[in-house]
Image (cartoon, helix red, strand yellow):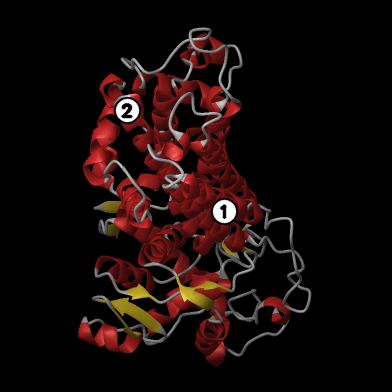
Amino acid sequence: MIILDGHTLTLKQLVSAARHHEPVKLSKKSIELVNKASSFVLELANSDKPVYGINTGFGDLANVQIDKDKLSLIQLNLLKSHACGVGDPLNEESVRAMLVLRINALIQGFSGTRLETINLMITFLNKNIIPVVFEKGSLGASGDLALLSHMSLPLLGLGEVFYKGKRMPASKALKLADIKPLDHLAPKEGLSLINGTQGMSAIGALVLYDAFRLIKYANLSLSLTMEALEGIMDAFDPKVHQVRHHLGQIRIAKDVSLGLSGSLNVSHQCEKRVQDAYSIRCAPQVHGASLAAFWHVSDIINNEMNAVTDNPILFLEEQQVLSAGNFHGQPLALGFDYLGIAIAELANISERRIERLVNPKLNNGLPPFLTACSGVNSGFMITQYTAASLVSENKVLAHPASVDSIPSSANQEDHVSMGSISTRKARTILENTSKVIALEIFAATQALHFRGSDKLGVKTKIAFDLFSKHIPFIESDEIMYPHIHKIESLIKDETVFDTIFEGDDTYEQ
């Protein structure tokens, strides 16, 4: 059970709730704050003083004061009119993460949402009633308005949900689950539900968590390639990295060295050659820079998961309501662009190592394209083509979305972050990079059948044996994609991850 209090949610807890369906509940202190804030909103709604989002219109209509008998209707209309998402529905875990994050923001006592509404959101989570949220349509500035509107409509029995593996109208799912929808929205509730960064935060947090795991596999694929190419270990000597002081590269060099300990395949400078190519010799610097970028984005995510991103914001002690811009996604947009670039670099350098494995001019005596009978057989020639295609696609996707902006709401909202685009691009880059790493593992494992798998290091031996159980030695040309897809599925399997990296330190902060 995860206790949400608005301040202590961690990335691992978010993943547990979103991906592994760990149930959540509210802290006692949060319940008190929610009730105080919702009472304050009712006081404001009953006064004649105009307060944005409570008794006024929204966006460019902020100067229009709303009659008291229409305060609930305008909140409902807000959700209906803002549910303009397009594209494919987000996957279940992303929407679950959105719900967790929005609840965690609303319970801090700065928003005014009723406890009844928040409890229903928790019921949706714990009973796995997942709103259908279309992935495109957010500018990432007045919050993820379209995405969060789709998330919120089912609370009123509107829109669609996924329930028990089926997509259906929310009203039908709630009836099947014997749950009553909200019969109305209180003043400000609609705005509080959708004015925030939880759409981009949810997707980006899951990408970041998976990136921390993928870089472990990037180190492993590097290590397997070093075994196959008789890589020079001197470039991983801790003294080299200590004098540069970059913590990321220090960690990477240490982990690769530990994984290769005991290997009889790797070499030292001047034994077989003076130095390796950059894709091996500079791997700690490149992988380490990506790891440092992940840590930087982790700081942003950990802060945002426990932040108030509503508008307007209630300050109960001062009895004050301030309209400002905490919903603006710029910190996340910049971070997710950086995250995408950092992940893409893992694929770039991996593809160069794949080329060295298959190229007879570069692979230190291995057969051309890793096949014993080249000419008749093409071997692993096209695995490099596929990797090259993926890294080229990543280069297009790595162009930052956050440098763009477009005005909206009659120019009232005249600078936007495009953060939801940044995070979706990062997700696609992660998927592509995972495939490239799988291709390197595939090629390196094949190469080690030629080089000798009896001389492997501690970690590379575990990995080679595990992958070889599923992927055969390719003696002559055969259909390759099932093997590639299999390795990709293996590196996403948590049991496989735990088997290979048992006892390792994790990179998540």
The image quarter containing residue 333 is bottom right
4 lies above or below 460:
below
Count up the numbered dots: 2
**Discs 2, 1 touching: Cβ within 8 Å:** no
Disc on res. 389: 1
Residue 360 in the figure: left or right of residue 502: right
Residue 379 in the figure: left or right of residue 310: left
How far apart are the two marked residues, 2 and 1, measured between alpha carbons? 27 Å
| Label 2: which secondary element | helix
In the rendered structure, which disc, 2 or 1, sits on the residue that comes first in sequence? 1
Neighbor class of circle 1 (other Cα within 10 Å; few <14, some 14-19, many 20+) is some
Q: Residue at x 58, y 17 (%)?
A: 245
245 lies above or below 28:
above
Residue 287 rendering spot, x and y as whole percentages: 53, 32
Residue 316 rendering spot, x and y as whole percentages: 52, 59
In the image, 370 versus 221, the foreground residue is 370
Disc on res. 133: none
197 lies above or below 63:
above
Residue 83 rendering spot, x and y as whole percentages: 53, 81
Task: Inspect this view and state whether residue 337 appears.
Answer: yes
- The quarter of the picture where the C terminus appears is top left
Q: Residue at x 69, y 76 (%)?
A: 59
Task: Inspect this view and state whether residue 42 appears.
Answer: no
Neighbor class of circle 2 (other Cα within 10 Å; few <14, some 14-19, many 20+) is many
Type of the residue with mark 2: Thr
Residue 109 rendering spot, x and y as whole percentages: 46, 59
In the image, 421 versus 509, the foreground residue is 421
The image quarter containing residue 455 is top left
Name the residue carrying label 2: 460
Type of the residue with mark 1: Ser
Q: Residue at x 46, y 44 (%)?
A: 375
